[in-house]
Amino acid sequence: MQIMTDLPTRAIGKIRIRVAVDRCVGHARCAAVAPDVFVLDDEGYNRTAEKVIGAELRESALRGQRACPERIITVEDLPD
Ligand code: F3S
């Protein structure tokens, strides 16, 4: 049996992403760096206030969070 020691921590479980959508000004950088997590509307705004996704997308979510100049994205690990 192979032991997978190079897996990132918290690779299993769920994370919650929250976006203060009323403060989104459409920089679109979240979706540019993490299109697997962040989706914009037809006008380029992030209108997804909250969603829960698998923790395998955690690094992508954090990349999108860091990319937003408005600092309106939070990423939270959910209890197993
Ligand atoms: Fe909005 Fe920030 Fe993304 S301003 S479109 S949440 S980079």
Image: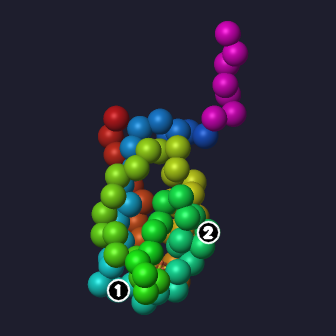
For disc 2, the marked residue is 33
Q: Is 49 rendered above or below residue 76?
A: below
> Where does residue 45 sit, x and y in percent of width and height?
42, 82
Q: Which residue lies at the image location 56% right of the left edge and 78% below the top edge?
A: 29
Out of 44 and 54, give the one closest to the viewer: 44
Range of magenta residues: 1-7
Image location of residue 41, percent across then percent down: 41, 78
> Residue tagged by mark 1?
23
Query: Amino acid under label 2?
Result: Val
Q: What quarter of the picture does the N terminus occupy?
A: top right
Left or right side of 14 for 3 = right
Q: Is mark 1 within 8 Å of ligand 1?
A: yes
Q: Residues within 10 Å of mark 2 (few under 14, many from 20)?
A: some
Q: Is residue 44 visible?
A: yes
* Magenta segment includes 2: yes
**Picture layout, residue 11 above or below residue 70:** above
Give the number of the mark in front: 1 or 2. Answer: 2
Distance in Å between CA atoms under marks 1 and 2: 19 Å
Q: Main secondary structure of the magenta part?
A: loop
Q: Residue 77 magenta-drawn?
A: no
The quarter of the picture where the C terminus appears is: top left
Using the image, determine if residue 80 lies above or below residue 69: above
From the top left corner, tell me how far across and down residue 5 is, in percent.
67, 28
As drawn, the residue found furthest toward the bottom would be 25
The disc label shown at residue 53, or none: none
Give the left or right position of residue 62, taking residue 18 as reference: right
The residue sitting at 34% across, 46% down in the picture is 78
